[in-house]
Image: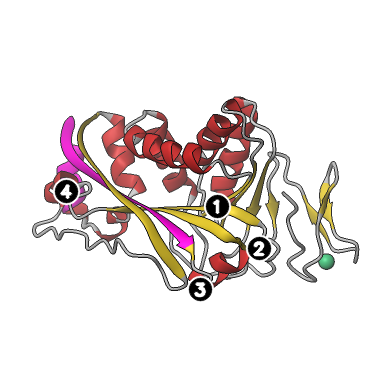
Amino acid sequence: MRLRCPICGMPLTREPKRYLCENGHSFDRAKSDYVNLLRRQSSRVRGDDPAMVAARREFLDAGYYMPLLEGLKEILLRYRPEVLADIGCGEGWYSCQLVSALHQNGVDTVFAGFDISADALRYAANRMKRMGVSDMDWAVASINRLPLADGSCDALLSIFAPVEADEFARILKPDGILVRAIPLERHLWQLKEAVYPKPYENRPVLEAPDGFAIESVRRIETTVTVTGDALKNLFAMTPYVRKTSPADAAKLAEMVSLTTELGFGLMVCRKDCG
Ligand SMILES: [Zn+2]
């Protein structure tokens, strides 16, 4: 997929060591093969830190979220998008496997993954190489100013990530879709119970964002038993880690295994051109 120059908006050409636009704006390709297209890195918005990224990578690699991956795969194999972007792709666990599945099923999908964490994209690009998946670009970019042309994407993925409805609608083709995954009411409930004196349920909004119409909604609910290091990784990758007192976190450190509910809400939203 042709990424766009964040300065002038012209298409970027991928050269061996950089991305370059015809106005001479140039962006280095990192050794691991992602590009930073954020014009100014705000000190406030840094994205996930290396420890959080590593924890999530190890937890996801252990396969605990396979039901969500399978649900996403089913949707993408139904819609067969040729141009796909993952907004907030993290370390690419979902993206690489989904694009690989599309390729294996005869869809020549080209892909771009965006995140504000360079640490996460380094993992993503390495995963892509390890899996031998081609046609994937990875860029540090802001969710409200994505380096893609108007009307260029068949489908967007937003997995546990914020949605910027106007910007998503801009880069989607007229009949493009947004595939969104959000945590349901009791997602990780027993983990919350283990660390909080008074846990609260999530309040998922299973509705289309402005400018989109709901095409389908699916609830995936299951339980998993998480053991050993995976339990520490699960805790470290969630937002709870920042809001938990040392005393509450210590409760979890003593546990050897935890059986918890998982709940994923999966929505397909169609860009509403009417
Ligand atoms: Zn330019």
The kind of residue on which mark 2 rests is Gly
Cβ–Cβ under 8 Å for marks 3 and 2: no
Disc 4 target residue: 189
Q: Earlier in the sequence, mark 3 or mark 2?
A: 2
Q: Is mark 2 within 8 Å of ligand 1?
A: no
Q: Position of residue 18 (x, y in %)?
A: 82, 49
Alpha carbons under labels 4 and 2: distance apart: 39 Å
Residue in the picture at 77% in, 68% down: 9
Instruction: Judge the density around disc 2: few (<14), some (14-19), many (≥20) Cα neighbours within 10 Å.
Output: some
**Disc 2 element:** loop
Task: Tell me, for residue 151, which label it has, or none.
Answer: 2
Residue 255 in sight in this render: no
**Disc 3 element:** loop
Alpha carbons under labels 3 and 2: distance apart: 16 Å
Task: Tell me, for residue 274, which label it has, or none.
Answer: 3
The kind of residue on which mark 1 rests is Ala
Q: Which one is closest to the eye, mark 1 or mark 4?
A: 1
Residue in the picture at 48% in, 56% down: 178
Disc 1 target residue: 155
Q: Position of residue 52 (x, y in %)?
A: 42, 47
Q: Position of residue 205 (x, y in %)?
A: 28, 64
Magenta residues span 248-270
Instruction: Judge the density around disc 1: few (<14), some (14-19), many (≥20) Cα neighbours within 10 Å.
Output: many
- For the residue pair 194 and 65, the one nearer the viewer reads as 65
Q: For residue 125, what is the image quadrant?
A: top right
Q: Earlier in the sequence, mark 1 or mark 3?
A: 1
